[in-house]
Amino acid sequence: MMGKLWCIGMGVLLLAACTNKDEFLLKGKLKQAVGIKMIKLYEGENAVDSAFINEDGEFKFTGSAPEPHFYTVSAGENSYFVVLQNGDEVTLNADMTDKDAKYEVSGSEVSKKIKEFSEINNHHLAISRQIQDDFRGKSTAEPAKVDSLRLEYLPKFQQNVTDFSEAALAFAKKNTDNLAGFYAVSTLDPAQYEEQIIAYADAIKNKFNGNAEVAAFVKQAASLKKVGIGQQAPDFELANTEGKPVKLSDFKGKYVLLDFWASWCGPCRQENPNVVKQFEKYNGKGFDILGVSLDRSRSEWLQAIKTDGLKWTQVSDLAFWNSKPAQLYQVTAIPASFIIDPSGKIVAKNLRGEQLGDFLQKNLVN
């Protein structure tokens, strides 16, 4: 009896010794991987390894990650997400014919949670694709109705985005102790969920030390705070359409709409008639606008100003998303806008349509 126990004990010790604590092991099997001979392992946007798939669809990766890091297994058109760190032995299995790219993972509780959120994400992506396909089908069949169809389908698309974002936020709140929660909250639009992103960053800022993505997220949240409601608007200087320098602080003493837009931005151009209407109504009554374009082409920028009848001051460095004011104000999507009061304080963000008119009517003397 003692001999059996000794053998079993030695077997366990030998098995443990085979697990290298200085690296991770990711292995698995991809069924129906027709035509796929090699897959890649990505950390962020960088391919860090590649592996051949054998005739049974099996693969294996090894690597080193002293702290937990996000990785993506890229196989054909499918992507599978895991979190790996040294000492992990994770198994990932998938059927390449599954249109929703579902997969099974074991050996890592965080990776299981990542999989759970991926299924939420894929569910809403499928809804989005269906809405887009329905719109394309109907607009192709009845091109004369494309505008009315757009009005019909846009709210459906926006509602699905909202539903996904709320699901992501709920998931993140349940997972502040692991990277799956961070993975979920990083999908939120900062323009719509600024407060929640800042709060989440505060909750995890002392966790996950050594993870560059988390560090960048916490840094971005700190930058968002600097341009939050109640903060003094950071000043900047940029050339106008005539090449003359203009400062944001030149407008101090008025309510100013700081409007980020571009000629190539459809939603921006759709909102412009409303902005023109409010400018014509309230300019001269303590209200002005400073437009900041994220264009790259000077001619297209100037033509859009003329076409849309934008009579207020316009500036641009023609640097696209590298626009210095856009980076200063953490603008990651357009249209984006900030209302700055006469003292230079940010008092509102992203007011469009009737919301902008209501704010101006309430705060300005008619």
Image (cartoon, rainbow, N blue to C red):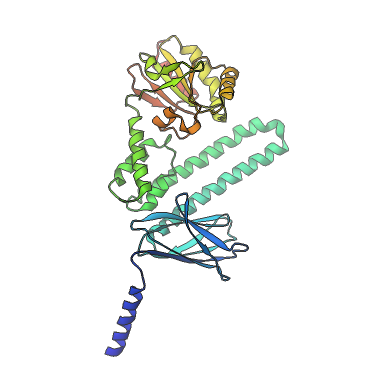
Residue 102 appears at what percent x and percent y? 52, 58
Q: Is residue 288 visible?
A: yes
* Residue at 31 percent of width and 47 percent of height: 204
- Whether 212 is drawn above or below 276: the answer is below
Residue 158 appears at what percent x and percent y? 52, 37
* Residue at 63 percent of width and 62 percent of height: 35
Q: 155 or 38, which lies in front?
A: 38
Residue 117 appears at what percent x and percent y? 45, 52
Specify the quadrant that holds the N terminus: bottom left
- Whether 59 is drawn above or below 173: the answer is below
Specify the quadrant that holds the C terminus: top left
Q: 208 or 164, which lies in front?
A: 208
Figure label count: 0
* Residue at 55 percent of width and 30 percent of height: 265
Q: Is residue 171 visible?
A: no
* Residue most extreme to the front: 243
Tell me if 8 is positioned left or right of 115 in this view: left
- Whether 42 is drawn above or below 329: the answer is below
Residue 361 appears at what percent x and percent y? 43, 16
Tell me if 168 is positioned left or right of 126 in this view: left
* Residue at 32 percent of width and 85 percent of height: 7
Question: In which quadrant of the rendered view does residue 55 lie?
Answer: bottom right
Tell me if 107 is positioned left or right of 133 in this view: left
Q: 257 or 25, which lies in front?
A: 25
